[in-house]
């Protein structure tokens, strides 16, 4: 039996169909006058006959058997098994013998090829079936080329013929010596090869040219010359990627032949076809920029093309900036209701000490397992969206990073999880800032004249902050509560890295990179998460460490530490929900370790400043 794959459905029980059953059923009647060779079209003909003969059990068993065999997926180009099932069925060896005995009686070459190939695949000693299959495949190719057979859905006949000739060549190589290949096979290949030597069919020519190389039917020089000639003669109406495939094939063969000048010529031609793909997405600046980038990447391997590279660089920057104007906007109703008013009212009733304490508790890290489960639901509910890969652009339209789509089988990779959880993070941060953080901050600001001194006790006693950075964070928190988000962002975000190193050192870790020459340097934020993630999870909890990673380090994601360190965070960005939430996260990280001792450590110092009671009162 032809084996199925690991994910095939349970097999269908099929009774033995005897010679007498086949003859009584006139088994070839449904396809005798069929003008197609596609096995699935043949299978559907048997499916229609099955539906029309519900009362005849002999015919039903026969049609069911032939439908199943014809519906097997033939993948001649697959390096693994050539056959794969749409459905599976247990076919005993005796049934295969019965089918093989009928091969010579079949008039339709498409059905004959399928039955003979099936019989030989289940019994590799059946040389007669192999020869019959090769002849039938060749006859199918000839019929497609001379008009005896046609195709459905507007497919070119040459496209449908390629898998037939490929399978025939495979079987000939496995069953015959090269010198004894049937003349009919080489003639059919030649006819099909010559039929595709047109500009319009250049993509199919490349497929046949690769077969010619694999089965030694043409010389590399012959194929390289023909592929380059077709690619060079192409018109603007020819699909550029098909032309590029011809140039790529020619370049590869010229390299093997040692003709570097011809190889360079073809490589340049392939680059220009990548640039020509812009015409396929004209008016979509981001898509056009993607193809220009592909052309630039290909140019890196060609010497002496600096001028063309410069031209494409200029064009790329123009398109990237234009793409920003074409980006859509999706408005989301945060559904905050009365929450902001209630939060503001609550914080107006608090003393400064209690307000600063409660401000640190306005949100908590979310469970990583639940976040992962939430995004995995998208694979089930919106599989097409989940399967899409995404390019993430910066504020100049340049592609900063890419994330893969979810695979058909198995778990998505880390970049997919970061992207999908990042989408949940964006909404969560916006709701938290608009619904709780900003109303609370405004209430505190309106109640008290916030100054740097109000944060001395917090930073002084916080184990999160190294001694040398304490005044920096105190000033940053003051700027945040005063509403100066630009100063707060640029003061506070860079402190995440030294604060995490400080936590690790307190736990006996050594977050240092030692170079080969004996010099040392502190690990960067990314290296801290790469080399000390278990320790950070233990110190901060996996949920909190994960949020820090997603906010300040990981890509795709805001990557705020890197962006801000390189001056990529604009004044407008500093007022965004993301940066606002990031600043609050740093405040929480500094305060959370003091919560249990807040009333004993922080409150008395604030009381010494005379700021323990909220002075706010509604005007009469």
Image (tube, rainbow, N blue to C red):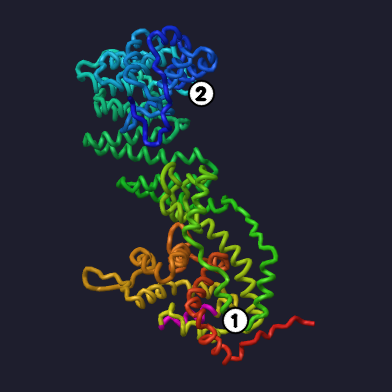
In the picture as drawn, the residue positioned furthest to the right comes out as 620
Image position of 616 with respect to 158: above or below:
below
Residue at image mark 1: 354
Circle 2 packing at 10 Å, graded few (<14), some (14-19), many (20+), is: few
SS at mark 2 in the image: loop
In magenta segment, residue 299: no
Q: Give the range drawn in magenta.
A: 467-477
What percent of the width, then of the height, locates residue 243?
A: 39, 33
For marks 1 and 2 on the same chain, the one whose residue lies earlier in the sequence: 2
Q: As drawn, is 302 to the left or to the right of 409?
A: left
Image position of 367 with respect to 497: above or below:
above
Q: Point out the image quarter for the N terminus.
A: top left
- Residue at position x 80%, y 82% in the image: 620
Q: Is residue 24 visible?
A: yes
Residue at image mark 2: 153
Q: As drawn, is 443 to the left or to the right of 582?
A: right
What percent of the width, then of the height, locates residue 440?
A: 63, 74
Foreground pick, 450 / 458:
458
Circle 1 packing at 10 Å, graded few (<14), some (14-19), many (20+), is: some
Tag 1–tag 2 contact (CB < 8 Å): no
- Residue at position x 51%, y 42% in the image: 384
Foreground pick, 473 / 336:
336
What percent of the width, then of the height, locates residue 267?
A: 33, 39
Q: As drawn, is 283 to the left or to the right of 445?
A: left
Q: Is residue 563 visible?
A: no
């Amino acid at each position: 039996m032809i084996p199925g794959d690991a994910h095939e459905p349970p097999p269908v029980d099929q009774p033995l169909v005897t010679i007498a059953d086949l003859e009584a059923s006139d088994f070839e009647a449904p396809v005798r006058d069929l003008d197609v060779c596609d096995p699935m079209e043949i299978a559907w003909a048997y499916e229609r006959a099955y539906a029309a003969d519900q009362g005849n059990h002999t015919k039903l068993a026969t049609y069911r058997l032939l439908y199943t065999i014809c519906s097997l997926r033939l993948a001649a180009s697959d390096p693994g098994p050539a056959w794969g099932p749409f459905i599976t069925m247990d076919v005993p060896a005796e049934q295969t013998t019965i089918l093989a005995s009928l091969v010579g009686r079949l008039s339709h070459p498409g059905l004959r090829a399928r039955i003979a190939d099936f019989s030989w695949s289940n019994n590799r000693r059946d040389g007669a079936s192999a020869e019959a299959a090769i002849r039938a495949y060749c006859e199918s190719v000839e019929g497609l080329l001379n008009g005896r057979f046609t195709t459905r859905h507007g497919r070119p006949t040459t496209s449908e013929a390629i898998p037939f000739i490929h399978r025939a060549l495979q079987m000939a190589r496995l069953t015959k010596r090269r010198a004894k290949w049937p003349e009919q096979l080489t003639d059919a290949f030649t006819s099909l090869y010559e039929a595709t030597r047109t500009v319009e069919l250049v993509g199919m020519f490349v497929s046949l040219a690769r077969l010619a190389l694999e089965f030694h039917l043409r010389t590399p020089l012959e194929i390289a010359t023909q592929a380059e000639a077709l690619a060079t003669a192409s018109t603007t109406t020819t699909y550029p990627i098909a032309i590029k495939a011809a140039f790529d094939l020619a370049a590869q063969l010229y390299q093997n032949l040692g003709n570097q000048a011809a190889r360079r010529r073809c490589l340049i031609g392939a680059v220009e076809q990548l640039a020509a793909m812009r015409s396929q997405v004209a008016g979509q600046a981001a898509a056009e920029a993607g193809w220009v980038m592909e052309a630039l990447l290909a140019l890196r391997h060609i010497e002496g093309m600096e001028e063309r590279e410069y031209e494409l660089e200029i064009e790329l920057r123009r398109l990237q900036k234009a793409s920003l104007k074409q980006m859509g906007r999706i408005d989301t109703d945060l559904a905050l209701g009365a929450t902001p008013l209630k939060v503001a009212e609550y914080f107006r009733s608090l003393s400064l000490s209690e307000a600063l304490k409660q401000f640190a508790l306005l949100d908590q890290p979310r469970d990583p397992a639940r976040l992962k489960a939430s995004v995995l639901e998208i694979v089930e509910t919106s599989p097409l969206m989940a399967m899409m890969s995404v390019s993430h652009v910066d504020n100049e339209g340049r592609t900063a990073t890419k994330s893969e789509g979810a695979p058909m089988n198995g778990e998505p990779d880390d970049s997919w999880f970061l992207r999908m959880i990042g989408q949940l993070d964006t909404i969560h941060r916006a709701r938290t800032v608009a619904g709780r953080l900003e109303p609370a901050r405004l209430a505190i600001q309106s109640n008290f004249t916030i100054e740097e001194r109000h944060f001395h006790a917090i930073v002084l006693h916080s184990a999160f902050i190294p001694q040398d950075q304490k005044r920096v964070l105190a000033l940053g928190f003051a700027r945040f509560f005063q509403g100066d988000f630009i100063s707060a962002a640029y003061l506070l975000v860079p402190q995440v890295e030294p604060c995490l190193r400080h936590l690790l050192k307190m736990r006996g870790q050594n977050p240092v990179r030692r170079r080969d020459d004996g010099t040392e340097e502190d690990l960067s934020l990314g290296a801290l998460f790469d080399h000390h993630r278990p320790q950070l999870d233990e110190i901060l909890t996996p949920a909190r460490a994960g949020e820090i990673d997603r906010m300040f380090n990981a890509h795709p994601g805001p990557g705020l530490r890197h962006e801000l360190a390189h001056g990529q965070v604009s004044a407008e960005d500093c007022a965004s929900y993301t940066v606002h939430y990031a600043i609050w996260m740093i405040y929480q990280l500094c305060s959370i370790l003091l919560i249990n001792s807040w009333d004993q450590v922080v409150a008395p110092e604030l009381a010494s400043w005379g700021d323990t009671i909220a002075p706010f009162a509604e005007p009469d």
